[in-house]
Image: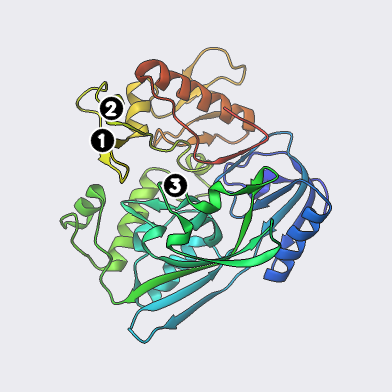
Amino acid sequence: MTSVPLASLTTSRVGGPARRYINAETEDELIGAVRAADEAKEPLLIVGGGSNLLISDAGFDGAVVHVATLGLDLNTNTDGTVTVRAQAGHPWDEVVAQTLREGCSGLEALSGIPGLAGATPVQNVGAYGADVSHSITGVRAWDRQDRAIVSFGNEDLQFGYRDSVLKRSTVNGSPRYVVLTVDFGLTRGMESAPVRYAELARALNVQVGERAPADDVRREVLRLRAGKGMVLDASDPDTYSTGSFFTNPVVSEEAAAHLPPEAPRYPVSQPGMVKLSAAWLIDRSGFPKGFGLPSTGQGTELAGGRASLSTKHTLAVTNRGNATAEDLLAVARAVADGVEDAFGIRLHPEPLLINCSL
């Protein structure tokens, strides 16, 4: 297919046309489409759920391969644990919901995250104190450089905060590895994994580190996410976004010492480093919920223009119904510049920006 509008494939509902579009419903079709584009030296963009992409209004002058492989297999191991293999194109929240229906816990805190299973190891997707590095046991992927199927164990993936070797490895400027399947190691039982996030623990009336019924954790996570506009809802423009547009910055303890004492700080694994709250920095830099720019790009107004920060959460840059990619980027640039002016810290985008930049 040609000239397919990419806005229809993204949760922000922006993006120009693809020169060529392929919907890959099987693993063989996915590998074949990627291999054909590479052999023709054609620019290639892999699209899954479109929840972590911001595509320019000019679109993509190349092949766009849409991952649409479906399937979920559960196998009980001799030690009583369960291995769940998800095809890359399986909707992520369906993976979470089905594993809970099967009596398996471990993914419940990751409920409601948009996108597909194959994207989760790339970004080390996480929320509410959990991320997929806690449960992923293996990934199969197509290696575009060596033209072979390769397998990764958990340690091979070199997980970091919203990062992995899959994200860092490129060929010809685009990802080297195309995820085919993801394996998760879960446990049988009705109890959740330990609750690691204070807001979620309060909602469940437990202490951080304690467990709760896994179904209750899913219910409360979905409620909390919906309250922040982070669960897709066709009737709510606050969900027309890429989710959190900015990552929480990880800075040196020396840099963090210059911030007000009330600025939230979170420990990270790197010595001498600390994670900050992007939402706190945005709010304290003069950008409240609903901040927007008129479509002319001149001046500021609350909830103005075709794009704005979410009215529920300052981390999301939202399409109010008829925004362009440039409208969303204009709001994001204003916020990133304002935070840097106020605190000397530059926020970086979490979504992949295609043919556009801050």
- The residue lying toward the viewer, choosing from 349 and 170, is 170
Q: Which numbered disc, 2 or 3, marks the residue that appears first in the sequence?
A: 3
Q: Which amino acid type is marked by label 2?
A: Ala
Assign a secondary structure to mark 1.
strand
Query: Which residue matches tag 2?
Result: 256
Question: Cβ–Cβ below 8 Å for labels 1 and 3?
Answer: no
Q: Which amino acid type is marked by label 3?
A: Arg
- The residue lying toward the viewer, choosing from 146 and 320, is 146
Q: Is residue 36 left or right of residue 201?
A: right
Q: In the figure, 315 relative to 87: above or below?
A: above
Query: Which residue matches tag 1?
Result: 265
Q: Residue at x 33, y 83 (%)?
A: 80
Q: In the figure, 40 relative to 312: above or below?
A: below
**Where does residue 205 sit, x and y in percent of width and height?**
17, 56
Q: Residue at x 79, y 54 (%)?
A: 37
Assign a secondary structure to mark 2.
helix
Q: In the figure, 296 relative to 320: above or below?
A: above
Question: Cβ–Cβ below 8 Å for labels 1 and 2?
Answer: yes
Query: Which residue matches tag 3?
Result: 162
Q: Residue at x 47, y 43 (%)?
A: 243
Q: Which numbered disc, 1 or 3, marks the residue that appears first in the sequence?
A: 3
Q: Residue at x 26, y 23 (%)?
A: 259
